[in-house]
Image (cartoon, grey):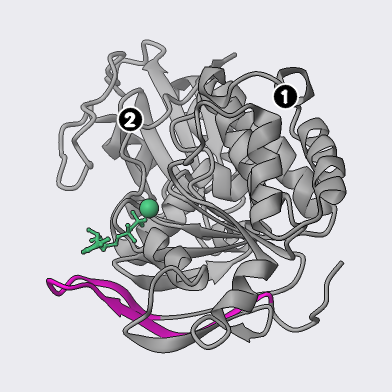
Amino acid sequence: MRAYDGPAIETEGLVKIYRGGTRALDDVSLEVAPGELFGLLGPNGAGKTTAIRVLATLLRATAGTARVVGLDVVTQAVEVRRRLGLAMQNPTLDAFSTGRETLELAGRLQGMAAAAVRRRSDELLELMGLSSVAKKLAGTYSGGMKRRLDVAAALVHCPELLILDEPTEGLDPQSRTALWEELERINASGTTMLLTTHYMEEADRLCSRVAIIDYGRIVVDGAPGALKQGIGADTVVLQIESDGAADLGVVAEPAGANSDGAGAGAPSDPVVLVRRLLEGMVAPGAVIAHPVGVSLAVPNANAAVPALLRRLESDGLRVTGLQVTQPTLDDVFMKYTGRRIREEAADQPLLLGW
Ligand SMILES: Nc1ncnc2c1ncn2[C@@H]1O[C@H](COP(=O)(O)OP(=O)(O)O)[C@@H](O)[C@H]1O
Ligand SMILES: [Mg+2]
């Protein structure tokens, strides 16, 4: 039940300069509407935790203002704390309390009556799939169960706004998916949510809106779909092979991964070849080398691919595999910052032969 109809979060020119001079937040202005599942996406060190600590009244900004459900985080801090639920990056659970005791303590700390706390704890244990381990010590829980218990503890007092700092950090893929589903359920039942993440798949899958933060600045915000559409092109990876047409002299081996094709003049270079064959259809600069062949940047690739293939194959080039990928939020991050968020190796593209 929402008591306030304005923005759930509203910040204006937030700046945080830590002692030592790090400018962790640099003019952050954000607005989160009630009911949103809003994501703050950025690499490590971008300022996500700092922003959350300011919103949760745990840290004073150097400049700027922040309101949570209409309340000022500095002058109305006590009231703000009552209206939000917070789960920080590292859950601070007591290993020697059971799941149920953890929730009951959280409720009592929020000033709830004993009977209400018991009812709410039952409900949350059920919601988070923890009923069967409610009487076990939290110390014996798996990583995913600890996270779910921590989120449940943040929800005990039915906050209007739930703030989660990197909720799935360190979880295995299965626990991550399970937690995503729970977070979606919580949001669908009316709780506005702000979460931070450096996993772009997470922001993409979960969030109705995302703000990308880098070096303390919001570089762009919008719905994930709209941000990706703004990239303007899909990627088509072609695995190619010579069919023996002597004059083409296409190499069957993968092309050098690090050649961008610029200035490549060898007639056997697939990039040069594909550029020539697709002249008039695809701009030369949109064709670059890829470990298995070439990669093309093509607007609306699904519609364009048949004609591209006809042209290539009629000229004797055999395409042995093809993959079309839509832009990701990582491409969006790249567009606005010139760097990639993804630190781990990119998922290997699955090439579908036919
Ligand atoms: N208590 C602190 N004192 C000084 N610098 C800090 C402190 N906390 C964070 N920082 C610095 O501020 C920047 C933003 O950090 P943080 O908000 O934790 O980013 P994120 O959560 O996105 O990884 C980083 O450069 C970090 O080193
Ligand atoms: Mg952080």
Residue that label 2 marks: 345
* Residue 289 left/right relative to 296: left
Specify whether residue 14 is painted magenta.
yes
Q: Which residues are magenta?
A: 8-27
- Membership of 91 in magenta stretch: no
Up the image or down, 329 lies above or below 101; here it is: below
Percent x, y of residue 242: 37, 16
Residue occupying image coordinates x 83% and y 77%: 3
Helix, strand or loop at mark 2? loop
Q: Amino acid at mark 1?
A: Ala
Q: Residues within 10 Å of mark 2 (few under 14, many from 20)?
A: few
Q: Say if residue 329 shows up in the picture.
A: yes
Counting labels gives 2
Q: For the point 22% across and 41% down, which residue is it? A: 261
At 71% from the left and 19% from the top, the residue drawn is 133
Q: Nearer the viewer, residue 242 or 172?
A: 172
